[in-house]
Structures are given as structure tokens and as C-alpha cells.
Image (cartoon, rainbow, N blue to C red):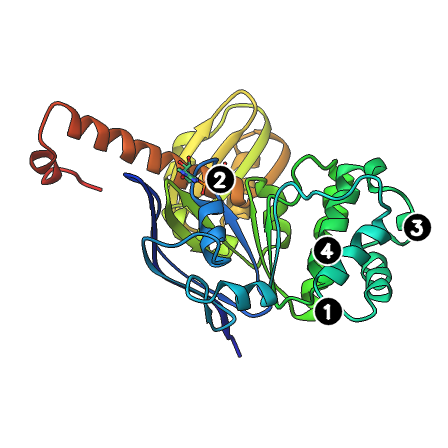
Amino acid sequence: MEQPIIEIVGLTKYYGSLKAVDNLHLSINKGEIFGLLGPNGAGKSTTILMLLGLTEPSSGMAQICGINASRNPIPVKRKVGYMPDNVGFYNELTALENLTYIGRLNGIPAAEDRAREMLTEVGLEAAMHKKTGTFSRGMKQRLGLADVLIKQPEVIILDEPTLGIDPTGVRDFLALIQQLSEQRGLTILLSSHHLHQVQQVCNRVGIFVGGQLLAEGNVNKLAAELFKAAPYVVQITGSGKVPESEVLQMPGIEKVTVTDAAVEISGQQDITPDLVRLFVSKGFDISSVQKKSYGLDEIYQQYFENNIKENVSNEKSSGLFQRSFFGRFKKR
Ligand SMILES: Nc1ncnc2c1ncn2[C@@H]1O[C@H](COP(=O)(O)OP(=O)(O)OP(=O)(O)O)[C@@H](O)[C@H]1O
């Protein structure tokens, strides 16, 4: 049974006249891994700060584990672990010493034992007696995760957790997050602009641009909504004359694009076998046939580009002419 653990209703934040977060509505279920995606300045960090009760919303409400974050920030801290994009530790202390110290500060009983347990859980067992000043960024992020986990939170919020880690480190770190979510039923909110990584681990994503949540859902749902005019795309490579006009007469075909590298055919249904038969019958020498599936990259690009176009048209309309005049003619 799905149970929202994070509820955001009409959340808005102004910094002076700048609307950093604009009327955000979002609900995240217990045990979900949710990815907040967006370019720099989109409003991700501001949203996280409001969820943690560290900055006051201008209007709206953020509730986490049943607690209103702006009214009761201290109880929120007990339930929610936050890992900022740059975690700091005492370089001259070992990982175990750092974590034990944090455990004691948080009043955790048998802090050293708990610290050992956590370090093992995040894969730092062999390095626990090394000074953290010698740690790589990937190791520091693992230690940051142990620092969050030692407080036994119900929700963890990670701001750009994989920034600056090498590809193997990223893969391992994401696998660890996924494992923690499964084993402990943890809810994880993760902000990032590394789309491939987010796509691998998140159950759902939210796309933020200019303070607004433009879309949310799982990658397949977003792709289906966004590319519904022509959800099937097949790429054919090879040599010979492309039977373009015949392809366009086939049922459900929307578009044929021929480049030096490949022929790309988009349509409303999957007619790959018919296409292959047609190409072969017309003497086209096929070397590969590939069905394309839309990933987060394409989805993000679509939303982002549409939003930029909209902003440009808004700016033009508010420049020389009155907004109200153009408002009537705006199609979007
Ligand atoms: N304390 C502040 N005072 C004034 N403006 C701020 C403040 N914090 C953020 N902003 C502005 O609010 C907008 C949203 O910023 P925010 O940091 O939430 O975005 P972000 O999506 O987290 O980006 P990044 O990935 O760069 O951290 C930006 O235009 C930023 O300049």
C-alpha cells in the first residue's frame, strides 16, 4: 500500500523578487527513490532546504514523516538525514573516530560499535582506521552516507551525491543506495543533473526548470506522454537506395529521416518486421536494425528546450509591448 512520507503542497519561495520555487506540488511514497532533476539554479536546493525546515517557505507547505517542516524543524532533523554535496570531516581523525564523534554528539548509545557497523555497511570496513584526509571523494561520500545512516533516519536526502566521483565509484555508490532503500525501507530523495545515473536507480523523477516542476513520473511514463505522437523509433543502417516514399505509405508511419549514417523511422506502432521486409525487397543491404527507446536524456531535453522557448517568447512579449496584449495570443 502506497503511503506518502513527503507531501509538498503549493510550496513557493521568493528571494526578493526572484521566485526560486514556484507552487510545487509533490508526493513521495515510503520506500521510493525519487530523483530531483534540473539545471543549476532550478530550485532543487531551495526545495530541499524547505523540506528540512532550514529555510521558510513564502507560501505553501512541506510535510515530511507527518511533520510540518517549517513549524517543527527540530523533530524533522531526527527523522531525516541530509547529505550536502560537500561533506566535511576532520582530516586528522580516522573514519572511525570521525563517525564515533558524530554518533556521540547525536547521543547515540555505544556510538563506536554503531560507527563500526555503519562503516562496514557502506563498504569502508578496511579503511576505517585511515585518516579521512587521505580519502578519495568516493570514500568521503560513503563516509557521508554512514554519517547520515548512524542517526537511523526514515528519509535521506542527498544533494548531488555522485559529483566528482569516477564512473566505477558512481556505480558502486548508486548500488549501495539502492540496497539500503530495499533492505531498510528507506525513502531517498536525490538531487542530480547526471541523468543516466538517476535513471538507473530512481523509481520516479521530477524535472525542475526555473523553479517549476514541469513533469514527474517514472521514465517510461514520461517518455510515453512526451513522445506519444510517434513512440516507436527504428534505426536502420546499411547501403542502397532508401525506399522512403513506400515507407511513408505504411500504416502509422509519422516520419522518415535519412542521414549518411542511418535511416530513422518513427511511427505509432512497431512494424519493424514489415520495414525489414520492405528494405530487403527493394535491394537495400541492411547491416543493422535498432529499436530506439527514449531515455531520461531525451525526456529532459524536450522539457528543457520547450521551457527555454517559452521563456524567450515571454521575454519578447513583455519587452516592447504590454504583457496583457500578447497574453491573449500566446498559444502555450
Ligand atoms: N539565499 C539566497 N538568496 C538569494 N537567491 C538565492 C538564494 N539561494 C538560492 N537563490 C537563487 O534561487 C534560485 C534557485 O537556486 P537553487 O540553489 O535552489 O537551485 P538548484 O536547482 O539547487 O541549483 P544548483 O544545482 O546550482 O544548486 C537561483 O536563481 C539562485 O540564484
Tell me how far mark 3 sits from mark 4, CA to CA. 17 Å
Chain-order first, disc 2 or disc 1: 1
- What residue sits 74% from the left and 35% below the top? 166
The residue carrying mark 4 is 147
Tell me how far mark 1 sits from mark 4, CA to CA. 18 Å
Give amino acid for label 4: Asp
Q: How many other residues sit within 10 Å of disc 4, few (<14), some (14-19) or many (≥20)? A: many
The residue carrying mark 2 is 298
- Label number found at residue 183: 1
Tell me the quarter of the image containing the C terminus.
top left
Task: Judge depth for marks 2 and 3 and give the one in front.
Answer: 3
Nearer the observer, 309 or 144: 144
* Res 135 quadrant in image: top right
- What residue sits 90% from the left and 47% below the top? 127
Give amino acid for label 2: Glu
Chain-order first, disc 1 or disc 3: 3
Q: Which residue extends farthest bottom?
A: 1
